[in-house]
Amino acid sequence: MARLLIPILLFLYALPGIASDSTEVWLLVPNQKQQLRLAIAQYEGLKDSVWHTFPGNLLLRPGDTSRYTPDLRTNLLLTGDLASADTTENATYYTRQLAAAVVRFQARHALKADSIVGPRTVAALNVSPQQRLRQLQHSLQRWEAFSRDLPQPYLIVNIPDYTLRLIDKNSVLLHMRTIVGKPNVPTIVNHTKLHTIVFNPYWYIPNSIASKEILPILKRNPGYLAKRDMELFKPAALGGWQKISPWSVDWSTVTAAGFNYRIVQVTGQHNELGLVKFLFDTRVSQYLHDTKDRHLFALERRALSHGCIRLQNPGDLALYLLQERSGLSDKRIEKVLTSDKDEQFIRLKKPVPLVIVYLTAWADESSVIQFREDIYGYDKPETVQ
């Protein structure tokens, strides 16, 4: 049976992520700038209001009584999540009306909408209106910068929202979760073009990862590479690289600063890039790719990579690009998908615009303002990306 065809089809039918996530089309809201400006005016009007913060260990469920309930009510009235003050005689009682307002607040911040005020909800509540105002102002600037003269179809990755969308003919054709770079190795904002699909990719492990993360393991166990389908190379006398056994190296003498080896992970079940990766023009070594760690897409916070963007459903994107942008015939596409080559590169005849943005605030299709966590700190007063 074909080596690649079945895994690719499993991407299409075995994963529920697209259906379970919101498919809102905020990117297509024609009056996005107007909505952001209205939200900016709203939050500018809150600068003289009292904003309450809450202890990180607060746990509040509907039906509870707490001295923090009146403060919660006040905040949600200011944000508009609570339309009017509820009429309960006991101000400390957490009513169903207030619980519904908490659900609206949670939904707008991509939190589990369960009405329980716990650590994640408290963290969002503790962000001041002044900080939210900066998010709105920075997001408006970024929106204006990337949305001008953007041809369709295009791909857009919103880093703080952990999502990728494919937009064509004013419709969202694909919508999937992503994993992005950790704060110390962030995914880079970019306006570029996706031009190549690589099936069964090798992972040429960056020196920073090899020297800092793999070297300490090799000092304890040189057999680690074989178990992970990795190969070791050293510089060859006449140039290039020569494959060697990790057991031939005295790792106790090798330091991270003096690490002069190359580690390559071949295709296989352990490959960190999965079955497919997508290349685009960039000044750093970052790309879109599959992953073997698919359970991580269930997490709410997904800033977990070394800068590359992992895709929940890369097979969907690969098939779209092959069928619509590669210029290959159906017969050639079938041959590509059933090939037993270890690694094959497909250069797209029509590259697709790819925009990697950092928007922590926007108006959705119902004109509801959405906020996301400022995972890289780009919305701090001194930082604009």
Image: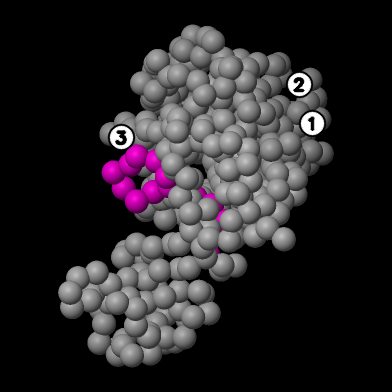
Tell me which amino acid carries mark 1: Thr
Q: Which tag is nearer the camera, tag 3 or tag 2?
A: 3
For the residues bearing labels 2 and 1, Cβ distance under 8 angstroms? yes
Find disc 3 in the rendering and name its residue.
Answer: 383
Real-space CA distance between mark 2 and mark 1, rounded to the nearest whole angstrom: 8 Å
Q: Is residue 249 magenta?
A: no
In this rendered view, identify the residue nearer to me: 147 or 182.
147
Q: Which residue is outermost to the left?
A: 238
- Locate residue 18, reporting x and y percent: 69, 38
Q: Which mark is residue 332?
A: none
Q: Is 223 rendered above or below residue 103?
A: below
Question: Few, some or many C-alpha atoms within 10 Å of disc 2 (few <14, some 14-19, many ≥20)?
Answer: few
Q: Is 229 rendered above or below residue 310?
A: below
Report the magenta stretch's main SS: loop
Find disc 1 in the rendering and name its residue.
Answer: 95
- Locate residue 369, reporting x and y percent: 57, 21
Identify the mark nearer the N-term, 3 or 2. Answer: 2
Identify the mark nearer the N-term, 2 or 1. Answer: 2
Give the residue displayed 63% in from the left and 54% down from the top: 338
Task: Tell me where the magenta segment starts and ends, as one range.
Answer: 271-288
In this rendered view, identify the residue nearer to me: 325 or 203.
325
- Image quadrant where one finds the N terminus: bottom right
